[in-house]
Amino acid sequence: MSWWRQPTEAWGRMRTFLKEVRAEMQKVSFPSREEVLSTSIVVVVASAIFGVFLWLSDLVILEVYQWIFDVLGT
């Protein structure tokens, strides 16, 4: 008759899990607002620079393909 013990064991495991989660969350050090803001600015600027680089690369590749098609007469 161990079937009735399974739900109580599950609640016990859940309680232990939640206690461990709480203990681990107390060890976490979260970044300050200034750190989040500064790293976000770095990400946005780097993304913009990379986007412009890819756009210019695309234009150059397009011009090279256009020149090749013009030369070959295709």
Image: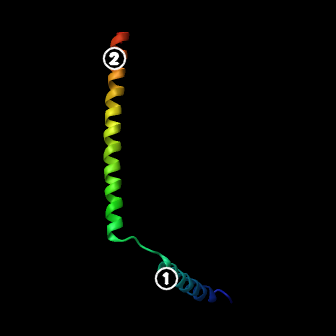
The residue type indicated by label 2 comes to: Trp
Q: Which residue is mark 2?
A: 67
Above or below, comparing residue 16 to residue 49 in the picture: below
Which numbered dot is residue 68?
none
Q: Quadrant of the C terminus?
A: top left
Q: Nearer the viewer, residue 35 or 47?
A: 35
Q: Position of residue 54 (x, y in %)?
A: 35, 37
Q: Position of residue 42 (x, y in %)?
A: 34, 55
**Circle 2: is it few (<14), some (14-19), or many (20+) Cα within 10 Å?**
few
Above or below, comparing residue 39 to residue 24 in the picture: above
Residue with the most extreme right position: 1
Which numbered dot is residue 22?
1
The residue depicted at 37 percent of the width and 16 percent of the height is 68
Residue 32 lies in what quarter of the image?
bottom left
Q: Nearer the viewer, residue 23 or 37?
A: 37
Q: Quadrant of the N terminus?
A: bottom right
Q: Position of residue 28 (x, y in %)?
A: 47, 75
